[in-house]
Structures are given as structure tokens and as C-alpha cells.
Amino acid sequence: MFRTLLVIAVGFLPSLFSLWVIRKTRLRTRVRMRQAAMNFPVVQVRHRPIEGDRYYLEGVGYLIGDISCKFNARSGYIRCAVNPDGPCNGCRHYEPKELVGSEKRA
């Protein structure tokens, strides 16, 4: 009977050791993340006025940039993926947006 309990206990030792290591690692990671968050400098988001190319679209809200461009993000915060800071006037990546209902009919 004692031998059976000893074999079972020895069989559980690797699992218990593994759980202990995982728990210590998680605790260490949590402490490091907290320290990194405390030491990270606060970055202020720069808000610059976007009045020149700001449009209000009913049902959507405010959009910036040339809304007829294929790459426009349709967002109030970013113009497009290609030229996010703008300006849209004279952008070399401009492509007119294809309209959904303008398919060629024969």
C-alpha cells in the first residue's frame, strides 16, 4: 500500500514542479509588465486642426481628405493608408473611387 502511494506521489512530482514554474514565470512577467508600464514615458497625441479638407457626411459623420479617392479611410482621424498626413491636393497616389452602380451596360 505504501509503495503504491509512493509511486503515485513520485508520478505527480513533475506536474507539480511544472505548475510551480509556470506560476513563478507568470508572476515575474506581471511584475515586469507593471514596471515597464510605470517607466514608459507618457506620449501626448498631437491634435492639429484639420479644417481645410474636413467634410460632414450625413449618417457617417466627419471625414477628412478627398472622399472621392479610392484610398480614403472614411475616418475623422486619418486620411488614407498611403498618405495619412496629407495633403490630398496633388497626391500622386490619387485614384478615383469606382462607383458600385456604374457598370458598363451593353
Image: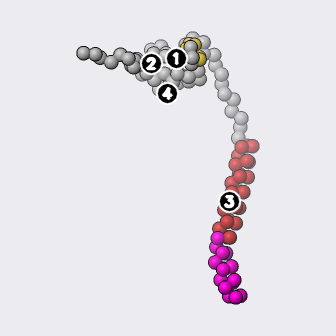
Magenta-drawn stretch contains 24: no
Question: Which residue type does callout 1 highlight?
Answer: Gly
Residue marked by disc 3? 25
Residue 17 numbered tag: none
Residue marked by disc 1? 65
Residue marked by disc 2? 69
In the image, the segment drawn in magenta is 1-15
Question: Picture coordinates of residue 71 (x, y %)?
Answer: 45, 23
Residue marked by disc 4? 81
- Gap between marks 3 and 1 measured at Cα: 48 Å
Magenta-drawn stretch contains 11: yes
Kindly state the secondary structure of the residue where label 3 is placed: helix
Horizontal arrangement in the rendering, residue 64 relative to residue 90 (left or right): right
Mark 4 and mark 1 lie on one chain; the one further toward the N terminus is 1
- Gap between marks 1 and 2 measured at Cα: 8 Å
| Residue at 65% over, 22% down | 47
Kindly state the secondary structure of the residue where label 1 is placed: loop
Q: Are marks 1 and 2 in contact (CB under 8 Å)?
A: yes
Question: Which residue type does callout 2 highlight?
Answer: Cys
Instruction: Give the farthest residue toward the top.
Output: 52
Mark 2 and mark 3 lie on one chain; the one further toward the N terminus is 3
